Image (cartoon, rainbow, N blue to C red):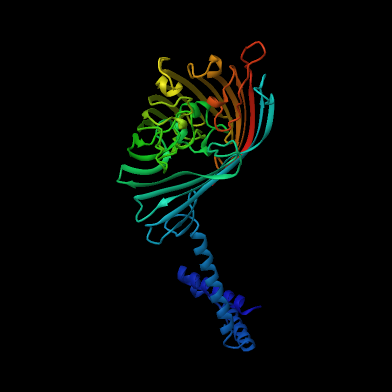
Amino acid sequence: MSLTKTVSLFAGTTLALTGVAFGSTEANNSLNGDALAQINELRAQIADLNAKNGENWLTEQRAAEIKGLVQDVLADADTRASFQGGTSNAGYDNGFFIASSDGNFRLNINGGASIRWTYNNRSFATGTGDETNWGFQSRHANVMLTGHIVDPSWKYNVSFAFWDASGDYNGSTFGGEAFLTDWYAMKDFGGWYLKAGQFISPFTRERALSDYGLQTLDHTNSSYAFGLGRTQGIEVGCISDWFRFAGAFSDGVGPMSPTQNAGFIPGGASPSADFAISGRLEGKLAGTWAQFEDDQSWQGEEWGLLLGLGGYYQSGRNGNANFNYAGGTEGNEFGFTADATASFGGFSVTGAVFYTQADSEWVTGTTGSGDFENYGTFVQAGFFLTEAFELVGRYEYGDFGNLSGTESANTQSTVTIGGNYYFAKNRCKWQTEISYAFHSMSESIFGIGGNGWYDDGIDATGNDEDGQFVFRTGLTVSF
């Protein structure tokens, strides 16, 4: 028997006997010679082990080994704690982060990517285009650097996107290029904030959502056609428990263009707007702000209702290349939107309406043809059959007036159905959907950003073709 086991046995026996002694005077008196004999026998065994192993059985070498083991355990505990957020200097907390020990400087690293396969079929193709097209797209790939400097009230955002050749920020025919999407500094005054840099113009809710928080593989066609993109300027806003507001003064950006405005270009060129203002007001009648940062209503989530209003006005000059119109003279444009989003804990519904109007001379370069009025709407719903599988449906309608010579080419009427499987909510998901167009589609209006739609042509009899459909399936991950 080892020394350790012997000592343990001796200690246990002694405690047991001691407990009995304190528990009963009668038992203490019954301690007979047999018990004393057992104690003496244990003492003899301990003495014999001491003689064999020496009195210094806990040698310096063994003590050093124990000390090293304790240090390793403590170091491992510190390492594990450093990756649990809180006050640690590095780790993961809704994104990887590095922070100073005093908490005044912090860098958050987020990002994501998606790969999808798209199939498009149309009845008639313009020019030399094919009626059937398919292939893979690396639609979204982003790196976002956010955090604060000086103190937590001074926030910043520097984000990049790596798009395919038909991507949202396409600048050439080559894919994989990096684009600076967002960069701004923001001062938080406790409820109010001031932001300056490049950012999404406040107008529609959907354009402000992350690419990785959508119920479908892309934003709606209506969002591209009627929503405002990125611009440079300043924004002021406020947020409370039940409402929030954001207003911006900027260089302006076209409602049909998802790309950022060119800004002030050296050499004398100015932006396509003398000035531009945009704003958005949201009222949260139920739920939390966090649950409206994505499209989904997860099972178990509380009831929530969000209402939103947006508007913009801009006065143009020096051409309007950034507005996707054919004209080149001075003009004005304005637009409004209203939307509602309801979350029922496993079932969600969202919808929006849009209206924009532009001066005829801005659109065509000539006067006398009347103002151009454009409007659209969409409604979208998602229902979780299980905790991880969601069914999605959407209908969109849009009309860009007499922007081109063929009326139906200015109109979209599309329906989309699909299903999503969430491996880890929006961190990792597989999405599949099929869309059908009841009118001929205009790629330049409703197919912006490589979202899978192509121009429908005009057949030999001069009739527009309809019936185009798009199938998409793909994997999206984010961190």
Residue drawn at the location 69% of the way across and 24% of the way down: 131
Q: Is residue 196 left or right of residue 17?
A: left
Residue 471's spot in the image, x, y percent?
65, 28
Q: Residue 406's spot in the image, x, y percent?
A: 55, 15
- Horizontal side of 190 relative to 135 (left or right) equals left
Provide residue 470's location: percent of width, then percent of height: 63, 26
**Numbered label tally:** 0
The residue depicted at 58 percent of the width and 77 percent of the height is 65
Q: Is residue 314 above or below residue 9?
A: above
Above or below, 311 relative to 12: above
Q: In the image shown, does 385 or 190 lie closer to the viewer?
A: 190
Looking at the image, the residue that sits furthest to the top is: 461
Is 288 or 472 nearer to us in this picture? 472
Depicted 339 relative to depicted 239: above or below: above
Asked if residue 353 shows in the view, the reply is no
Residue at the spot 67% in from the left edge and 19% down from the top edge: 124
Quadrant where the image shows the N terminus: bottom right
User: Where's residue 28, x and y in %?
Assistant: 49, 73
Furthest toward the front, the residue is 267
> Residue 107: in sight, yes or no?
yes
